[in-house]
Image (cartoon, rainbow, N blue to C red):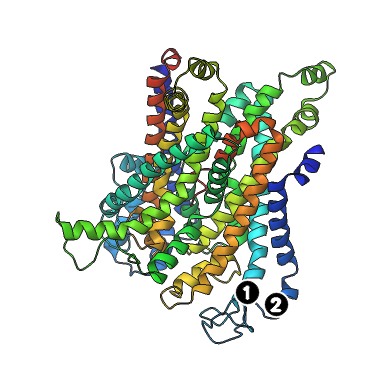
C-alpha cells in the first residue's frame, strides 16, 4: 500500500487526483449544482452565458451548464467502466500467457498481435455503424472488447520476468496451485503496470467515446460531452457565434484528460525510481497509444 | 529471411481477419441486411443497386463457405464494391480521390511533428531537470492527453472564426479551378494551414516524450561518458553519439504513426471539412454507406500492416542480429 501513500506525496498526482475528484463530485452532485434539467427546454435558443444560464443555452434551449455537469456522469461511467474491462481482460490474459507459456502463450500472443495491428478507430467505427445509434453502455462494451491488446502485451512481458524470481520458484516447489501463484505471487508485483494500464485505458475510453459520439455514432438522446459536441457542431454553433455551446464540453474533456494523464505520469514516477532518468515513461507514452488514442 | 517471411504470413493473417469481420458484420444484422442498408441509407431500392450491393458483400446463392471465399477473392483483387450513396461509383475510386488530400495533409504533418518532436526530445533529455525540460515534458503530456477533436475545435474557433486568419473549410477555394498555378497552390496552402497545425499539436507531444526517454536511457551508457571524457564538444556527443542511437526505436513509432494517422486525421478532417479519407468516412457514416465504411477499414488496415512491415524491414537493415534469426 506504500504506492498509495507515495501517490499522496507526489505533486503531479495530487493535482491530477484533485481534478479527478472535482469531476467525480460534480457528477455525483449534479442535481444540487443546477436547478435545470439537462433534457428540458429552459430558455431561448443560443442565449449567451448570463447569471441565469452560466454557460448559456444550446440551440434547443437546453442549459449548457446543466448538460455539462450531468454529462460528466456518462464520461466517467464509460471511461471507468470500459477502462476496467480493458484492464481486466488485459491483465488476466497477460498473466496467463506469461506464466503458462507454451501453446497457451502462443495462442494468446497471436491474437494479441493481430488485434494490435488492426487499426482501432476504423474498426470501432465499422462496429458502431452497424450497431446504429450506440448507447454509452454499448460503446463501453465494444471499447472493452477491442482495446485490451496493449495491456496483454505489457503485462505478459512483465510476467515473463517475474516468473523467474525465487519466490515464484519456491511457491511452485511448495506445490501451490498455479491460479494461486498467478493471483497472489505475480499479480501484486504487477500493480503499478496494472494501474498505468487502467488509467491509460480510462483516458482512451473517455476520448474515444466523445469522438464516436461527435462523429454521430452515439445515441443523440444521451446527455454526454460527446453528444454535446455533436449537437453543437450540427447546430453550427461556431458560425452563429454560440461558442459557449462548443467550448464548454471541449474544456471539460481537456481538463479530465489532463487530470488522468497527470495521475498516470505520477504512478510511473513512483513505480520506477529511475523514471526521472527515463525507463517506464516510455511505456507510459505507449499506454496513451500514440496515434491510436489520438482520435 | 525466415523472420521477414514469418512476419509477412502474420500480416496476411491479420488482413484476412479484418476482412472476415467485414464479411460477417452484415450477416449478424437481424433481418435482411441488404434491405436494411438501403433503408438506412435512404435511397430507393432499384434491382440493379440491390444486385450490386449483394455482390459487394458476397451474398450469392451459395453456401456460406463459398460466399466467404468469393468475398475474399474480390477484396484481394482490389474490388471493394460500390458506394450506395454515389451509386454506381466504385468504392476504390471514391477513396482514391480522397487519398491524395489525406496523404498530403497527414504526410507533411507527421514528418514535421516527427522532426520537431525529436528535436525537442533531444534538447529536453540533454537538459533534463531544467525548466526547459519540465516545460517540454508537461506540454507533451498535455498535448497527448487532450482529444484531437478538442484541439481541432479550439483551433477552428480561435483562428478560423475569432481572428479570421484562415478559412473554415475545404482544401482550396471552391471557386478556383484546380491547376498547377500559384493562385491555386497558395489557396491550398492557406486552407491546409489550420488542419496541419492541429495535427502537429496532436502528434508532436508523443514523439517528443518517446525521444526524450530513449535519449535519457542512452545518456548513461559508457560510450557517452567516453565521448565526453575524450573532450569532445557537447553538441557532437549529443547529436552524433546519443541522438543517433536514440533515434532507432523512434523510427518505428514514426512508421506506426504513418499507418494509424490515416485514422487519426479523421476528426481533424471532419472539423475542418477537409476532403480527405477521414471526411469521406464521416460522410459515409452519416449516409450509412456501408461499403465505403468497410472499404475504409480494409484500406486503413492495409496501410497499418504496410507500415509495420516497413518497420520490420528497417530493423533487419539496422540490426544485423535479426538477419540470422
Q: Chain of mark 2?
A: A
- What percent of the width, then of the height, locates residue B172? 25, 62
- Position of residue B102 in the picture relative to residue B65 (left or right): left
Closer-to-camera residue (B110/A143)? B110
Pointer 1: what residue? A65
| Residue B242 in sight here | yes
- What percent of the width, then of the height, locates residue A55? 59, 76
Q: Residues within 10 Å of mark 1 (few under 14, many from 20)?
A: many
- Position of residue A99 in the picture relative to residue B222 (left or right): right
Quick check: A98 above or below A9?
above
Closer-to-camera residue (A286/B304)? A286
Pointer 2: what residue? A34
**Judging from the image, what secondary structure is the residue with disc 1 in?**
helix
Q: Chain of mark 1?
A: A
Residue B193 quadrant:
bottom left
- What percent of the width, then of the height, locates residue A223? 61, 70
Q: For the point 62% across and 73% down, which residue is it?
A: A67
Residue sticking out furthest to the bottom? A44
Q: Quadrant of the N terminus of chain B?
A: top left
Quick check: B54 above or below B162?
above
On residue A222, the disc is none
Count numbered badges in the picture: 2
Nearer the N terminus, badge 1 or badge 2? 2
Quick check: A135 above or below B125?
below
Q: For the point 78% across and 46% down, which residue is it?
A: A8
- What percent of the width, then of the height, locates residue A227? 54, 67
Quick check: B299 above or below B192?
above
| Residue B80 in sight here | no
Closer-to-camera residue (A173/A53)? A53
**Judging from the image, what secondary structure is the residue with disc 2 in?**
loop
Q: Are marks 1 and 2 in contact (CB under 8 Å)?
A: yes
Amino acid at each position: 500500500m506504500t504506492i498509495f501513500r507515495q501517490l499522496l506525496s507526489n505533486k503531479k498526482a495530487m493535482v491530477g487526483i484533485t481534478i479527478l475528484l472535482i469531476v467525480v463530485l460534480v457528477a455525483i452532485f449534479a442535481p444540487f449544482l443546477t436547478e435545470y434539467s439537462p433534457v428540458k427546454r429552459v430558455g431561448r435558443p443560443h442565449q449567451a452565458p448570463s447569471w441565469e444560464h452560466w454557460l448559456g443555452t444550446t440551440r434547443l434551449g437546453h442549459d449548457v451548464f446543466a448538460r455539462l455537469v450531468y454529462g460528466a456522469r456518462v464520461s466517467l461511467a464509460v471511461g471507468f467502466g470500459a477502462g476496467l474491462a480493458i484492464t481486466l481482460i488485459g491483465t488476466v490474459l497477460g498473466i496467463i500467457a506469461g506464466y503458462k507459456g507454451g501453446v497457451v502463450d502462443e495462442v494468446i500472443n497471436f491474437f494479441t498481435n493481430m488485434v494490435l495491428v488492426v487499426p482501432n478507430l476504423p474498426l470501432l467505427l465499422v462496429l458502431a455503424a452497424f450497431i446504429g445509434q450506440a448507447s454509452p453502455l454499448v460503446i463501453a462494451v465494444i471499447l472493452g472488447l477491442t482495446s485490451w491488446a496493449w495491456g496483454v502485451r505489457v503485462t505478459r512481458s512483465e510476467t515473463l520476468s517475474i516468473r523467474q524470481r525465487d519466490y515464484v520458484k519456491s511457491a511452485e516447489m511448495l506445490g501451490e496451485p498455479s491460479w494461486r501463484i498467478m493471483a497472489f505471487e505475480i499479480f501484486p508485483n504487477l500493480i503499478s503496470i496494472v494501474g498505468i494500464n487502467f488509467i491509460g485505458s480510462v483516458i482512451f475510453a473517455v476520448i474515444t467515446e466523445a469522438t464516436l459520439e461527435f462523429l454521430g455514432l452515439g445515441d443523440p438522446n444521451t446527455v454526454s460531452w460527446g453528444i454535446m459536441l455533436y449537437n453543437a457542431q450540427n447546430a453550427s454553433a461556431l458560425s452563429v457565434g454560440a461558442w459557449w455551446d462548443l467550448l464548454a464540453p471541449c474544456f471539460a474533456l481537456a481538463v479530465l484528460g489532463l487530470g488522468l494523464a497527470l495521475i498516470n505520469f505520477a504512478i510511473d514516477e513512483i513505480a520506477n525510481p529511475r523514471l526521472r532518468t527515463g525507463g517506464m515513461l516510455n511505456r507510459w507514452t505507449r499506454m496513451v497509444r500514440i496515434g491510436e488514442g489520438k482520435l | 529471411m525466415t523472420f521477414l517471411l514469418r512476419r509477412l504470413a502474420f500480416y496476411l493473417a491479420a488482413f484476412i481477419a479484418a476482412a472476415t469481420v467485414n464479411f460477417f458484420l452484415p450477416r449478424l444484422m437481424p433481418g435482411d441486411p441488404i434491405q436494411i442498408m438501403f433503408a438506412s441509407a435512404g435511397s430507393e431500392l432499384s434491382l440493379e443497386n440491390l444486385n450490386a450491393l449483394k455482390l459487394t458483400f458476397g451474398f450469392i446463392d451459395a453456401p456460406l463457405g463459398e460466399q466467404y471465399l468469393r468475398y475474399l477473392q474480390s477484396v484481394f483483387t482490389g474490388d471493394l464494391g460500390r458506394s450506395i450513396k454515389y451509386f454506381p461509383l466504385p468504392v476504390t475510386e471514391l477513396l482514391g480521390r480522397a487519398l491524395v488530400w489525406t496523404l498530403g495533409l497527414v504526410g507533411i504533418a507527421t514528418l514535421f511533428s516527427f522532426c520537431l518532436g525529436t528535436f525537442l526530445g533531444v534538447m529536453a533529455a540533454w537538459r533534463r531537470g531544467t525548466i526547459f525540460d519540465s516545460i517540454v515534458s508537461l506540454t507533451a503530456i498535455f498535448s497527448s492527453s487532450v482529444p484531437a477533436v478538442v484541439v481541432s475545435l479550439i483551433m477552428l474557433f480561435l483562428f478560423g472564426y475569432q481572428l479570421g486568419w484562415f478559412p473554415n473549410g475545404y482544401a482550396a477555394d471552391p471557386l478556383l479551378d484546380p491547376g498547377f498555378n500559384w493562385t491555386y497552390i497558395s489557396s491550398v496552402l492557406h486552407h491546409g494551414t489550420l488542419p496541419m497545425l492541429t495535427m502537429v499539436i496532436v502528434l508532436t507531444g508523443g514523439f517528443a516524450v518517446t525521444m526524450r526517454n530513449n535519449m535519457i536511457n542512452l545518456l548513461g551508457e559508457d560510450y557517452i561518458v567516453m565521448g565526453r571524457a575524450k573532450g569532445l564538444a557537447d553538441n557532437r556527443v549529443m547529436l552524433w553519439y546519443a541522438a543517433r542511437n536514440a533515434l532507432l526505436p523512434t523510427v518505428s513509432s514514426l512508421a506506426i504513426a504513418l499507418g494509424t494517422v490515416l485514422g487519426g486525421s479523421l476528426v481533424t478532417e471532419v472539423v475542418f471539412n477537409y476532403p480527405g479519407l477521414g471526411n469521406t468516412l464521416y460522410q459515409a457514416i452519416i449516409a450509412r454507406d456501408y461499403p465505403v465504411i468497410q472499404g475504409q477499414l480494409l484500406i486503413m488496415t492495409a496501410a497499418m500492416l504496410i507500415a509495420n512491415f516497413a518497420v520490420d524491414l528497417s530493423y533487419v537493415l539496422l540490426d544485423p542480429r535479426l538477419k540470422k534469426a
